[in-house]
Amino acid sequence: MSREPFFRRKTSISYKTEEKTVLRGYNVSDLAEAGYTFCDAMFVLFQQRLPTEEEEKMLEYEMGEFLEHSMSPSAASAFAVISGRPNIPAAAAAAVMTFGGAHGPGAAHGYMLHKYIERARVEGISLEEMGKILVDEHMDAGLAVMGMGQPQHLDGDPRAEPTHIKHEQLGINGVYLELQRSIEKHFNERRKREGKAYVSVNMIGAGNTALAELGFAPNAAWCIGCVTRGFSCAAHALYQMKKGRAWAASKSEPMVQMLDLSMIKYVGPEDREVPNQEERQEYARKQKEEGEWKKWVL
Amino acid sequence: MGTIGNLDDPRLNYDYSKRERGTVPQDKTRAPFQWVSAVAYKNVHRIVTRGYDTTELVEAGYGLPDIIFIDFQARIPLIEETQMLNYVMVLSLDDGLSSPAAIARITGSSTTLLTQACGASILAFGHTYGAFDSFGKMLDKYLAMVENEGKPTGEVAELLARENLDAVHLGVSDMMLKDPAAKRTFARAEKLGVAGKYIAFMKEVVAAVQKISDKPVDLDLLGAIGATMMDLGFSSDATWVIVAITRAFAAGAHWCEEVEREPQQRFGEALTPQEDYDGPDDRPVPTLEERKRFASAVEYKTPEEWKKGFVEKQKMYGTGWRIVEDIVDPRDFLKKQGRK
């Protein structure tokens, strides 16, 4: 058996020999033996340091909360992927990969906080004032203020405000929470002035703020949130695999299945005849000129 | 418009010219579709997994590994079980630049989202690297002989060793002869009182393999983590995916480092040296007019011709013909049922 490196890179993350696997200088087996938790190891991995007990507690809290969110795009993806019965990691991978610009956009929120904290520093403005500037700039430009609102939890994500409170209770609050709180305050003050309903902070606003405060870079924070969700999505996929029917379209099930033909609603072009090859060129030219197709271009 | 192609062929199952148009009406005779789950639900104010409100869980001091137990096993774990899962997850987090990290970096080198790289790293878990599913199913198969047929564990462990000596998912290999991490995992499980039938059996398997192996071997990390996770109550496929996801956190760090330190790859940029190539020699492309002279069909008319062609095609790498996968043979089932 060859144990030659599979892939070569200069790396400051880890190395592995016949004797040990070393992460940021720590033998991972020794870390585990000493009783450090997986959340402790997250700090080692992304920050090259062991956290304080309070920091570890905050991360346990957050990862615990992030883990399960019932049917979100990620769980729905895992459910759909496993209905074709690939290997279970494919469903978990699909779930993690649903996280983008709308579902858990943690990195973008982190970069937004960084940008405005830096502006506060350079421009000599308090974070309280900078929160108002951030809100006004975004709302004036017609942009969403990241970290606010959730399409299912209309009265506020049940996890979000408790996360802020835990963040304060553990005494790890700093610039990030100060700016985030200011954003929330000014966002809703402005909405009130404009006659709009109150919108609460979501788990990006609350959770990502705490992760930033814990010292995680925006992408590291994003990784922690999204990959943690992968665990519950894997459980959802296993449930579908072990208790549900492959293909999710069986007529024998008492409930109409996700991919039953009757679930399809079509709103595209009317059914039309297929032109034969002799007619094709003229047909295509005319169709292109008429331009009706542009209505359907994606 | 007349018939299109073969769509009037009498062998077709129905008349293609009379097929209905439009979608299928909604089925009102059955309950409407819902996302059915025994894992979790949420409403406007709550997220509930296996009956426990997740915010109440974390407020009460439960953490990540506790909620993994709840999600996968619908139970609050013992403190020792949580400690053991933490231990296993720390061990599983990083494995140097092995395939999950490499694939995350390759994905990241195209300037992708971090989540694509993490997802790709999970896909690296198969039936060789991180073969927890195959490993666990192997243990279950042989332990069933102990439980259902009353055979002694030592005898079954020896049978497992003989029948799986070269299996990549054996969990016993020469990879951990100098690294104590695998054996420490079992020792920790025993110390915490969470070791059960899988660890006990795996220890017998290790001894049995050591007896017949022609080289020094010992428990490896696949065997250590796999048996420990199963003693913690996780199924083999749950173990597989939990470890794969755990590894994806480190893949995220590798994505970051790749983006931070390495040049990004453009389409068409990377060269492949000709000295690494062992396919057909360079040759001129025939014109379309010449095509008939060069092109030859490979349809075989008899099984014998087919077999010759099959063997010939297996000489070519990258065609897929060299990969032979074993599929279920229904005769085995019939034999088990005493019908053959």
Image (cartoon, coloured by chain):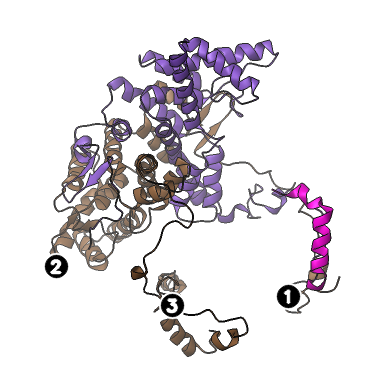
Please give the residue where the numbered disc 2 appears in the rendered image.
B214
Q: Is residue B62 visible?
A: no
Instruction: Specify few, some or many for label 1: CA neighbours under 10 Å numbering under 14, 14-19, or 20 or more.
Output: few
How far apart are the two marked residues, 2 and 1, measured between alpha carbons? Answer: 60 Å
Q: Residue at x 54, y 20 (%)?
A: A201
Is residue A280 found inside the magenta-colored segment of the image?
yes
Q: Residue at x 44, y 80 (%)?
A: B313
Please give the residue where the numbered disc 1 appears in the rendered image.
B12
Of tags 3 and 1, the one toward the viewer is 3
Q: Chain of mark 2?
A: B
Secondary structure at numbered mark 1: loop
A203 lies above or below A270: above
Chain shaded purple:
A
- Tag 2–tag 1 contact (CB < 8 Å): no
Secondary structure at numbered mark 2: loop
- Display colour for chain B: brown
Q: Which residues are magenta?
A: A277-298
What is the three-letter code of the residue carrying label 3? Answer: Asp
Sequence-first tag of 2 and 3:
2
Please give the residue where the numbered disc 3 appears in the rendered image.
B282
- Residue A65 drawn at (x, y percent): 44, 28
Sequence-first tag of 3 and 1:
1
Is residue B12 found inside the magenta-colored segment of the image?
no
Question: Dividing the image into 4 quarters, which one contains the N terminus of chain B?
Answer: bottom right
Sequence-first tag of 2 and 1:
1
What is the three-letter code of the residue carrying label 1? Answer: Leu
